[in-house]
Image (cartoon, rainbow, N blue to C red):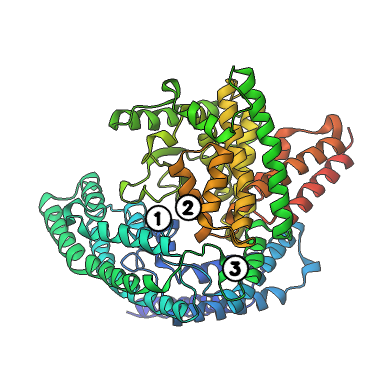
Amino acid sequence: MRIVAKLGKIFLGLMAVISVAAVYLWYGRLPIDWFFNRALVQMTLESPETLSQLRFLESVGIKFHQDELDDASLEVQERQIKKIRAIHAELRSYERADLTEQQKITYDMADWFLARMLAAADRFRFHNYPVNQLFGEQNAFPSFMEATHQIHGVRDADDYLARLSKVGVKWAQMLEGLKVREQKRIIPPTFVIEKVLAEMRAFVATPAKDNILYVSLAKKLREAKLDQDEQKRILASAQQRIEGDVYPAYETLIAYFAKLQPKSNQDAGVWKLPEGDAFYADILELHTTSTLTPDKIHALGLSEVARIQAEMRSVLTSQGYDGTRPLGDLIRGIAEEPRFAFSDDAAGRQQILAQYTTIIDEVSRGLGKYFKRQPKLGVEVERVPVFKEKTAPGAYYNPPPFDGSKSGVFYANLYDIRATPKFGMRTLAYHEAVPGHHMQIALAQEQSDLPLFRRMAPFTAYTEGWALYAERLAWEVGFQKDPFDNLGRLQAELMRAVRLVVDTGLHKKRWTREQTIDYMAANTGLAMTDVVAEVERYIVMPGQACSYKLGMLELLRLRENAKAQLGSRFDLREFHDVVLRNGAMPLFILERVVKDWIDETKSKVS
């Protein structure tokens, strides 16, 4: 008994020490790398949905968050802003001069990002449209449940059901913020309201057993090989919750937007919002990590459009086409030629997915000469879920979870078969998968020596600039030998140049939606369904579309500067490694990182 008592005292003592250490680690002053990780963990713990996406906790059997949805209330938003303010103040309490070079990079990234977030929260917290046709909450929820909530056992399935039952609570919280926006006259354009109403009405009109929430659950249950009786119980409960909880929640949103619609108008740009011009300048800087003004970006776009169109006309002339015809009409006509089209049926769509996989496998095998490392996890190709493909972009990428339990996914939109001409497929695969988004993002996640913030930093100009640079790189090193594949690459780059023109046109120069569609259709040759989806994307995501071209141009500038300074000592593999191994960052910090590498390379004895 004495031994047991003694062991008990030792155990209690250890628990006390651990508890004190835990409190200190959570609230005390830490070495700065630990501080960065703690800050990110503290913020992430506020979001059950983010925890599910990252899968940090599930990988060690912790699932307390898995039956919850994010709290979208104004109260929680206020608490998060206070927490960010406290984190920023604590960051600035560290003496930057005492840090290592890598720590200084992380410090500067976090300082810039947190300062931008707080400035936006103070002035522009409500300057967005949480329910929109692109990535609104109403279509993000079913996508999240289908793509993120994993099921390996009965508890996971019951947690799925619990999340279904909580949609009404989250939607009610979201409505608080929507009503504040309404009071501030931050109301989506009429076409946005019309599209989300059509989408939500179609969603609730779908029989529960045909709904993606039910269909994807049934598939997951089969794959998990749960007991048949359990599967029947779970699916019966899912049907009840879709009909009794999910659909009524959506009906609440439908009723709200039906009443809001008469208060809306067709003005598309954010210039119409309170302090609209200041907001646009702010959001441009956040997305592009550049201080270029809207007018300078617009002029740069016009210049790039002219340059790229000249290159395209040269390719077209060399292939026997009349390069003097209106470019948009000419490219659309080529895309509809039988040799570049897939059949508009299930077989044709399956061929597209298979062809994307073939392209990715081919380029992945040939990148060793240009990259020192490639991601451990692969990337799969899937179709954009049918329920949202009508308003979704042409393609997008979801990274693998941090626990490595799932590959990255390149989603291809197959709604309009004409929007996928064969000569554009290579470029799209290079952008979304390899050597584009998947290579960059998956590699960043694998850099275990970097703080978590660096491994998942959301700097759009870097990530999208890299993906556009990857398109060009694949052509430069010989993966697009066919002139028509190069035409597809140029068309994709042209679209990003046009984005500079139309984003600033919409939000600064007060272009209408129709004027913007006409300009983009005439100058890109994209299918009209893509043109409309693109323009409507820029309307609800101001500034983001400008990040692609600005990021690509900066990467090319940095590469050419490195070549000029290093001459024969320039190594493309090393340049790519310097850019990728540090994770995403603002462009002005990337410039410093590349300069340090150049100086270090120069200093080495040949």
Horizontally, residue 180 falls left or right of residue 445, namely left
Q: Position of residue 350 (x, y in %)?
A: 33, 31
> In the image, what residue type sits under mark 3?
Trp
Q: Residue furthest left?
A: 229
Q: Please report whichever mark, 1 or 3, sits nearer to the chain's N-terminal start.
A: 1
Quickly name the residue at label 2.
402
Tell me how far mark 1 sits from mark 3, CA to CA. 46 Å
Q: Does residue 317 sit above or below 138 in this rendering?
A: above
N-terminal-most mark, 2 or 1: 1
The image position of residue 604, as x and y in percent, is: 87, 39
Residue matched to label 1 = 59
Query: Considering only order in the chain, which callout, 2 or 3, is on the residue closer to the N terminus?
Result: 3
Contact between marks 3 and 2 (CB within 8 A): the answer is no
Q: Report the Cα–Cα distance between label 2 and label 1.
A: 9 Å
| Residue drawn at point x = 29 percent, y = 66 percent | 163
Instruction: Assess whether mark 3 and mark 1 are in contact (beta carbons under 8 angstroms).
Output: no
Viewer-nearest residue: 79 or 131: 131
Query: Does 101 sit above or below residue 125?
Result: above
Which residue is labeled 3 in the image? Answer: 271
230 and 219: which one is in front? 219
Whether the residues at callouts 2 and 1 have beta carbons within 8 Å, the answer is yes
Marks 3 and 2, how far apart in space?
A: 39 Å
At 10% from the left and 53% from the top, the residue drawn is 229
Which mark, by number, is residue 166? none
**Amino acid found under the numbered disc labelled 2:** Phe
Considering depth in this image, is 7 or 477 the residue closer to the camera?
Answer: 477
Mark yes or no: residue 39 visible. Answer: no
Between marks 1 and 3 in the image, the one whose residue lies nearer the viewer: 3
Of 280 and 140, nearer the camera is: 280
Q: Disc 3 or disc 2, which is closer to the eye? A: 3
Which element type, helix, strand or loop, lies under badge 1?
Answer: helix
